[in-house]
Image: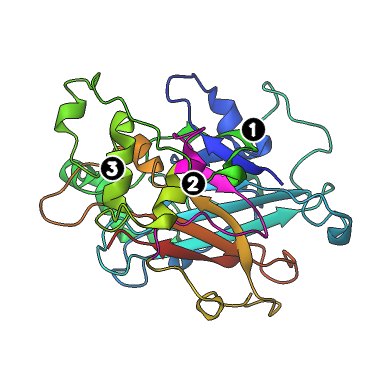
Amino acid sequence: MSVMLGTIDEHSITESFSLTSRFFPSKVGGKPAWLDLKHIPEASELACLKCNIPLVFLCQLYAPIDEPKFRGSCFHRTLYVFYCNECKDGRTFSVFRSQLRKTNEYYSDEPAEPDDSDITPAMWGIQLCKVCGCKSSMEFENVYCSLHHKNIDLNRELKDKFIVVLPEYIINEESDESSENASLNSEDDESDCSENSDEAAHIPKGSLQDMDGLDEALLEMAYGGDKDDEYFEKFKKSISSVPEQIIRYNRLESPLWICTKRIPEINDIPSCQYCGKQRSFEFQIMPQILYYLKLPESSTKESFNFGILAVYTCPESCDAGEKYKKEFLWEQSPL
């Protein structure tokens, strides 16, 4: 079975309509394009468990499941990933799953056209925060989700201090049939770093913001870069055909780990809190995504770096109860 890869073409022009809910986008950054428009998570569900600052929307992946046993319950299905940009130790991540049948109260059975009227949560009486696009709160006049975002909106200095919305990119999908055939015995590809621009010369080592120096950056991500780590060697060879990949989708299979450290045991992955089934791997976010986020380096706190972000979901994609169900993310962190 081939692995589906997600990539970004930062030089392509994306029409704004294609990033809206009715086109079911897979994307990085910007504001969430909510699938179920009437049952959006409350602001309290999207706040960091440690610092209580609203989480930052990282990406969403449109991942319908067309299998007979699901009986059409996953005709539309999107996974959303949020993270805390402020905490440096034990960073909070949240993953939400939303799914709809083909016939639902929001979207037509026919594919949307660019000139169709937009569909928004406001049509069902749901107001979104003008800063982050998450559900607003009555406490803040249904304009903001939190006092934090209200202050940021009204204070220019705070806008420069806090990351609220990341750069927005559409995620392109392609199949990688060669990645599973990566051999630990094949020769390493040499990276040509001779054409780095002046801008690249100022990029911090190991930040993964220099795509030309990807091998060196990944080595730093891999906990100091043990060159004899067979997981790291397999990782490099598996991504060699598409080194800029930011997503690897391989539902019900295994993640591609970057090194031997912090690989979870089965007991580390909690069962689905709604139906009790043991969660299984669905997709992973690759450290190469950091190149596109281009987050500012900070001298006062640790920047947002990671090895692998592996998302585990209910294998049955159960649909009873809450419309946005929490799933689980395992961070293979760089330290």
Amino acid type of the residue tagged 1 in the rendering: Asp
Name the one closer to the observer, 186 or 198.
186
N-terminal of the pair, mark 2 or mark 3, is 2
Check disc 3 and report the residue beneath it: 217
Sooner in the amino-acid sequence: mark 3 or mark 1 = 1
Number of the front mark, 3 or 1: 3
Q: Residue at x 63, y 41 (%)?
A: 4
Q: Quick one: label 1 or label 2, which is nearer the N terminus?
A: 2
Residue 280 pos. (x, y %): 63, 66
- Secondary structure under tag 3 reads helix
Question: In the image, what residue type sits under mark 2?
Answer: Cys
**Residue bearing the label numbered 1:** 118
Mark 2: give few (<14), some (14-19) or many (20+) Cα within 10 Å. Answer: many
Labelled disc at residue 59: 2
Q: Whole-percent x and y of residue 211? A: 33, 31
Q: Nearer the viewer, residue 331 or 300?
A: 331
Q: Which residues are magenta?
A: 237-260
Q: Is residue 96 magenta?
A: no
- Which element is circle 1 on? loop
